[in-house]
Image: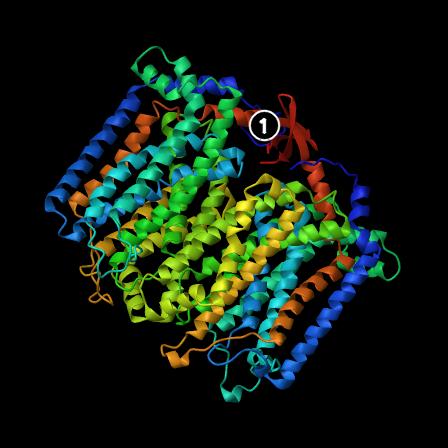
């Protein structure tokens, strides 16, 4: 990477700890705005719990709608963390440094948000408690461990715990810096969280080892989570769901939407917290190039899903796809999804000027996530609308204001949690930035100094 | 090239590398001609096996199962090796430089593969009544489109090889004494003088052709698995199959690269080019591909096993649990369990013998897996059934089949040997470029390398 500006350790500390040590007015304004949206969302959910699921658009046979789409969407967003943090760490990509913590944190909060969706979707959330803790053994009712609906929370909670551990482990050196700069009640709190970190060689060695081990161990969890979510659909016999390609299709779609969410987050962070010294054009350029590969892989899986859906010429399968692609309003959604997920952004990303433009990358990354939300919606709802073989079983689905409010609220929730996190912890790892500067060097090639990295092996 | 140690690591100069590689390139010793003779003999035996099958005609499709499985194996190994080179070049992996030419040279094997596809297409039953991806627009399908696709991929692969070899062909042109070989090399060098504009065209061309190759290859696998496997098995709707084949191919190609590097080290003395760094670095993606191999297979299996649909259940019985259980288990071990157990251990991964041994196992496992898929498909008498009933038994290879498999692999290796006497098997210019981007410096008491990455 180009380290065009060499900052001292003190400068790095001052700039990255700015929002932790002080509270800018814009932070208060944005947090208040998000809090208002959240209160509205809680009210909507409370109204729904009080009145019943009938106030939503869910009707027989379409019992999975916006809430489940949202669930899948946020699980997908959570895949950014491991992609950016673990995979790029293991492949020693230097450009990952400013974005690892933001990506990992977004993973944790996205997973929390996704877990809330089935709770809301249950209609009577307290009954989930009986399902998790079957207190009355006399009834002989146990969770069905052969159901993917049991594998789901198992995988997601495992992913949540391991991601949280990942965030916390990497946060320890920075917590020690904040501890040393804090006064009053903050000092003992950060002191406790820092776990006695003093930065001696043994601690740094263990820190490095923990990073590598956690990165390697979290990878199977990362792949399994969205695969298991996909098997909620894949192992059923609903037409257009019983497809073998769903597992990798969902995973790569998750990486696609997740990395785009990281792009959005980095650009917003850069603007909000004035992080121009740390987030450069080279970073979003690298992310965009990664996205071209991921998006093209996603397109291959989408194409396989479509081709093999038509393979057997089964009537019900064809009916679902005809609904998706040719009957409004689903055909419009299909067109928007396809254009937003691939056709518009990927050709744009081929141009260096677009990849290095923060404005263009912000809009294309948002566009991708609009498209990917619609993708999940189009996978789930039309299939249920045409689930039965008889036409009198056909139904339609219209989402309600409640569901739309919950969607907006979920975005506000993740944003709010990220904002809260940034108030107490730095979103860019201080020690990673300092380490990157120490390892940076250059090699003289002819008249040019080409940036390089010190490599141990 | 060595890791950081207490003494200052010695990095060779471009001139030393060029002199060494050119020296090996110029001599055509007895050992070389011995290997060529052996491979040519095996290839001729393969032709004998093919002629025997040809004499039997195309009425009994089961006779051609091993022929098609061999094609798939060659596509999965030799034809996939340029992707290793193109992918690592895109990722700017510095450790790739000494073996990229080896993987690119394998593109010439596609000439033999394209020829082998012709009788394979003749053995296919008509499209009517059975599943296929050509839907209502057959228009020459599958023959025309398969030949065009295979031909295009072969053309791009050879063009990529030729483009990337131009600087070294020019070096060879200037080093070889006047001879017929020198005239051929001079023609192939196309007037290369190393002008700035020529280098720009080379970089851009290799990038574009490499990208096209990587995009076209999954299409080839999709056509191959759809037309020659899934389309011959009743009710086999497995959307992940092409992707599974692509991942298996990447794994097999990486394994084959490791095997070839090991053989070149031991037999041809290329140990200073194929060091621990190359084996260790390639072992990591090899482990990833092995895990992905299992993941893709499992995604397919769990969906069918869970669904319990009659058509899908009978196919699982046929391909995995009953008739072809033996090859499935062997392939499962060689392509997943074995690499996983071996490569998680640092001493094995950070060695030369470890990755090479695992690579050899993967290549064998890939061959067995392709036999399981394609011989099984070609053994089904009626692909127009709704459910596979009765379930056919497994099919052992006959003598002509063994000759075809051995002969085809030998033919590809023969082409590689022949082309390596026109195009140097080590990429001198890429290694020289890499040497310019590396320097040694002292870093906290140790001497380490600084590797530059140009943008």
Q: With respect to residue A5, does A140 lie above or below?
A: below
Q: Residue A385 appears at what percent x and percent y?
A: 45, 74
Q: Is residue A197 visible?
A: no
- What number of labels is visible? 1
For disc 1, the neighbor class at 10 Å (few under 14, some 14 to 19, many from 20) is many
Q: Which residue position holds label 1?
A: B437
Q: Residue B126 appears at what percent x and percent y?
A: 20, 55
Nearest to the observer: residue B288 or residue B85: B85
Badge 1: chain ID = B
Q: With respect to residue B354, does A255 lie above or below?
A: below
For residue B101, what is the image quadrant?
top left
Instruction: Left or right? Give the position of B64 relative to A322.
Output: left
Instruction: Left or right? Give the position of A309 relative to B35.
Output: right
Nearest to the observer: residue A175 or residue B48: B48
Q: Is residue B50 visible?
A: yes
Instruction: Left or right? Give the position of B151 relative to A6.
Output: left
Q: Residue at x 67, y 80 (%)?
A: A46
Nearest to the observer: residue A16 or residue A50: A50
Q: Residue furthest bottom?
A: A138
Q: Residue B166 appears at what percent x and percent y?
A: 42, 23
Q: Residue furthest top?
A: B178
For residue B48, what is the image quadrant?
top left
Q: Residue furthest left?
A: B55
Q: Residue at x 55, y 78 (%)?
A: A57
Quadrant (top left/top right/bottom left/bottom right) for the C terminus of chain A: top right
Q: Residue at x 41, y 40 (%)?
A: B213
Helix or strand or loop: what does disc 1 sit on? loop
Q: Residue A3 appears at what percent x and percent y?
A: 70, 36
Q: Residue at x 36, y 42 (%)?
A: B360
């Amino acid at each position: 990477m180009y380290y065009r500006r060499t900052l001292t350790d003190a400068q790095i500390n001052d700039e990255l700890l700015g929002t932790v040590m002080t509270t800018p007015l814009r932070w208060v304004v944005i947090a208040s705005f998000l809090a208002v949206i959240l209160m509205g969302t809680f009210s909507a959910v409370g109204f729904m719990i009080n009145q019943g699921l009938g106030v939503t658009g869910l009707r027989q046979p379409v019992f999975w709608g916006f809430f489940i789409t949202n669930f899948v969407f946020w699980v997908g967003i959570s895949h950014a963390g491991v992609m950016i943090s673990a995979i790029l760490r293991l492949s020693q990509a230097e450009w990952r440094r400013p974005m690892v913590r933001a990506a990992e944190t977004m993973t944790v909060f996205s997973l929390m948000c996704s877990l809330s969706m089935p709770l809301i979707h249950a209609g009577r959330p307290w009954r989930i408690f009986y399902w998790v803790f079957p207190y009355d053994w006399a009834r002989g009712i146990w969770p069905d461990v052969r159901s993917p609906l049991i594998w789901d929370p198992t995988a997601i909670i495992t992913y949540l715990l391991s991601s949280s551990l990942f965030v916390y482990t990497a946060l320890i050196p920075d917590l020690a810096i904040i501890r040393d700069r804090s006064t009053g009640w903050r000092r003992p709190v950060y002191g406790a969280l820092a776990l006695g970190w003093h930065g001696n060689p043994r601690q740094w060695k263990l820190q490095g080892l923990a990073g590598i081990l956690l990165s390697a161990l979290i990878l199977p969890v990362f792949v399994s989570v969205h695969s298991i979510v996909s098997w909620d659909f894949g192992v059923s016999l609903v037409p257009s769901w019983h497809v073998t390609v769903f597992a990798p299709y969902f995973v790569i779609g998750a990486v696609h939407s997740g990395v785009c969410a990281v792009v959005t987050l980095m650009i917003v962070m850069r603007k909000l917290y004035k992080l121009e010294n740390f987030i450069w054009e080279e970073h979003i350029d690298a992310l965009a190039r990664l996205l071209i590969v991921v998006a093209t892989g996603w397109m291959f899986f989408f194409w396989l899903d479509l081709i093999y859906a038509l393979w057997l010429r089964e009537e019900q399968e064809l009916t679902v796809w005809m609904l998706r692609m040719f009957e409004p309003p689903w055909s419009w959604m299909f067109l928007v999804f396809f254009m937003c997920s691939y056709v518009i952004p990927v050709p744009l990303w081929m141009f260096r000027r677009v990849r290095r433009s923060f404005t263009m990358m912000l809009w294309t990354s948002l566009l991708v996530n609009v498209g990917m939300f619609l993708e999940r919606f189009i996978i789930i709802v039309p299939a249920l609308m045409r689930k039965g073989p008889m036409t009198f079983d056909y139904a339609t689905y219209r989402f309600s204001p409640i569901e739309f409010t919950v969607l907006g609220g979920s975005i506000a929730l993740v944003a709010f949690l990220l904002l809260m996190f940034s108030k107490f912890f730095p979103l860019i790892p201080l020690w990673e930035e300092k380490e990157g500067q120490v390892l940076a060097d250059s090699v003289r090639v002819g008249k040019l100094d080409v940036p390089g990295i010190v490599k141990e092996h | 090239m060595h890791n950081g140690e207490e003494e200052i690591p010695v990095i060779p100069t471009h001139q030393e590398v060029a002199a060494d590689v050119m020296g090996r390139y110029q001599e055509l010793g007895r050992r070389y001609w011995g290997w060529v003779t052996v491979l040519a003999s095996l290839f001729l035996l393969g032709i004998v096996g093919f002629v025997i099958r040809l004499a039997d005609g195309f009425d009994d499709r089961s006779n051609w199962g091993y022929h098609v499985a061999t094609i798939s194996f060659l596509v999965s190994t030799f034809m996939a090796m340029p992707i290793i080179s193109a992918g690592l070049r895109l990722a700017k992996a510095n450790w790739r430089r000494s073996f990229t030419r080896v993987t690119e040279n394998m593109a010439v094997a596609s000439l033999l593969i394209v020829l082998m596809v012709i009788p394979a297409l003749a053995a296919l039953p008509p499209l009517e009544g059975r599943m296929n991806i050509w839907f209502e627009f057959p228009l020459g399908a599958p023959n025309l489109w398969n030949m065009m696709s295979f031909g295009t991929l072969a053309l791009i692969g050879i063009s990529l090889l030729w483009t990337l070899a131009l600087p070294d062909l020019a070096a060879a042109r200037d080093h070889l004494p006047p001879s017929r070989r020198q005239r051929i090399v001079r023609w192939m060098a196309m007037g290369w003088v190393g002008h700035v504009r020529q280098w720009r065209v080379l970089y851009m061309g290799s990038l574009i052709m490499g990208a096209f190759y990587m995009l076209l290859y999954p299409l080839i696998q999709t056509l191959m698995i759809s037309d020659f496997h899934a389309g011959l098995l009743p009710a086999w709707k497995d959307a992940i199959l092409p992707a599974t084949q692509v991942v298996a191919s990447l794994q097999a190609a990486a394994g084959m690269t490791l095997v070839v590097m090991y053989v070149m080290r031991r037999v041809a003395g290329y140990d200073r080019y194929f060091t621990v760094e190359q084996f260790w670095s390639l072992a990591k993606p090899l482990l990833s591909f092995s895990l992905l191999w299992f993941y893709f297979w499992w995604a397919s299996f769990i969906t069918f096993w869970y669904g319990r649909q009659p058509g899908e259940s009978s196919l699982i019985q046929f391909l995995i649990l009953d008739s072809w259980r033996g090859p499935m288990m062997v392939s499962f071990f060689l392509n997943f369990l074995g690499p996983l157990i071996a490569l998680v251990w640092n001493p094995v991964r950070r060695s030369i013998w470890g990755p090479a041994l695992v690579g050899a196992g993967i290549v064998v496992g890939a061959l067995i897996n392709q036999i399981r898929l394609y011989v099984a498909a070609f053994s089904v008498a009626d692909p127009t059934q709704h459910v596979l009933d009765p379930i056919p038994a497994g099919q052992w290879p006959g003598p002509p089949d063994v000759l075809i498999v051995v002969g085809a692999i030998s033919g590809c290796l023969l082409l590689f040997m022949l082309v390596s006497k026109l195009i140097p098997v080590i990429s001198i210019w890429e290694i020289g470029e890499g040497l310019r981007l590396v320097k040694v410096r002292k870093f906290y008491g140790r001497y380490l390398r600084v590797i530059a990455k140009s943008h």
